[in-house]
Amino acid sequence: MDRFRLGQLLHRSRPGPVGEVAPWDRYGDVMNTRLPDALTAERVEWLPAEASARRYARLHRPRGRPHRTLMAMLFHPATRPQEVDRVARATQQLDAAGVPVPELVAWDGEARWILQEDLGDVTLARARRDGQALAGAYSEAVALLETLAPLSLDTSPKPPLAKQRMRAELQQFAVLALKLPEGPGAGLADELDQLAARCEQAPVALCHRDYHSRNLLLHDGRVRVIDHQDALAGPACYDRVSLAYDPYVELPDAIRDRIAGDGDQLPAVALQRLAKAIGTFADKGGQWSACITPAARQARRLLSRGELALPLLDLGLAALATGCAPLTARAPVSGRAAGTGSTRAAP
């Protein structure tokens, strides 16, 4: 079978004519880099593109290596070589600490690629859709966080996942998901300030930052972790609530709450995480928009417990939870928030 050089094809599910290139969607650019012969293989299988700035290709029988398959991570040509090195070092450090990330095989910062172990395609989300029993896998995923939490990496993005960053994410939620291009009004802004402040009171640990069913793979009877390169310090319960209130899978509420555990600041951290996710989904649009409604429903369920009094935020989430345009975008809210007795200003 003819060998294909990575970079001759881009963003395809199967190889096409040599020299053909396709758009690098996120940047509206074209990737036409010719990568070294070190990354040639008998067959190249391009994985479906996600919203990431990276592209992934499965190399079948890569030349000069004993592996049957390997996964190539390709970075946009504008990526700084130092960023590629940072991602590779994060993988090395987590692997050395016992976190089950893919084994790093090789990388080249200047050529903007990383070659790593191929863990297959069976995510927890896919296994759940296929009807597999996953109680053991979820228990294992929660237990893995005990290995991750006490670590400190020199590759973590700055600033940490603390009040400043979390408040900025809530601002993005208000602008993009609640359709408030000039930002929230004083009342909603005050509630978002309160939420970020509550989150900062939580104990701090290393967080994966995107710990959910699409970033956890089942491979050789174990749970393996991917998309780990941006692990950073943040609220200790952040990853558990990310897994528990994951909008990519359908789970009974009782199981979600069991996965989340408990803690004084857990509802606030979970609510912030969901709002952040909703803002991201709104920004991406397209297929991601379908994730907004289940995330908003979980956020409202957390608010319904009564541990957090954030009536204007709940009002904004109410429409998102039903798949409608946010109330804040359809009509101004003034005076009292319905059913709350609040006299705060409209968001």
Image: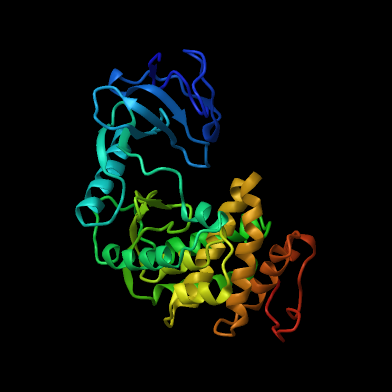
The image quadrant that residue 316 belongs to is: bottom right
**How far from the left and from the top, in percent, is residue 137?**
41, 62
Q: Residue furthest left?
A: 96
Q: Residue furthest right?
A: 331
Which residue is at 60% across, 78% downward?
A: 303
Q: How is the image coloured?
A: rainbow
Q: Where does the C terminus fall, quadrant-wise?
A: bottom right
**How far from the left and from the top, in percent, is residue 23?**
55, 26
Q: Is any part of residue 197 visible from this angle?
A: no
Q: How many marks?
A: 0
Residue placed most toward the observer, 322 or 181: 322
The image quadrant that residue 208 belongs to is: bottom left
Q: Where does the N terminus fall, quadrant-wise?
A: top left
Q: Is any part of residue 278 visible from this angle?
A: yes
Which residue is at 47% across, 13% downward?
A: 19
**How far from the left and from the top, in percent, is residue 188?**
62, 71
The correct choice, above or below, for 92 with respect to 10 in the image is: below
The correct choice, above or below, for 238 with respect to 44 in the image is: below
**How far from the left and from the top, in percent, is residue 47?**
48, 35
The correct choice, above or below, for 259 with respect to 29 in the image is: below
Which residue is at 34% across, 52% downward?
A: 157
The correct choice, above or below, for 59 with respect to 293 in the image is: above
317 relative to 4 in the view: left or right: right
Residue placed most toward the observer, 9 or 236: 9
The image quadrant that residue 62 belongs to is: top left
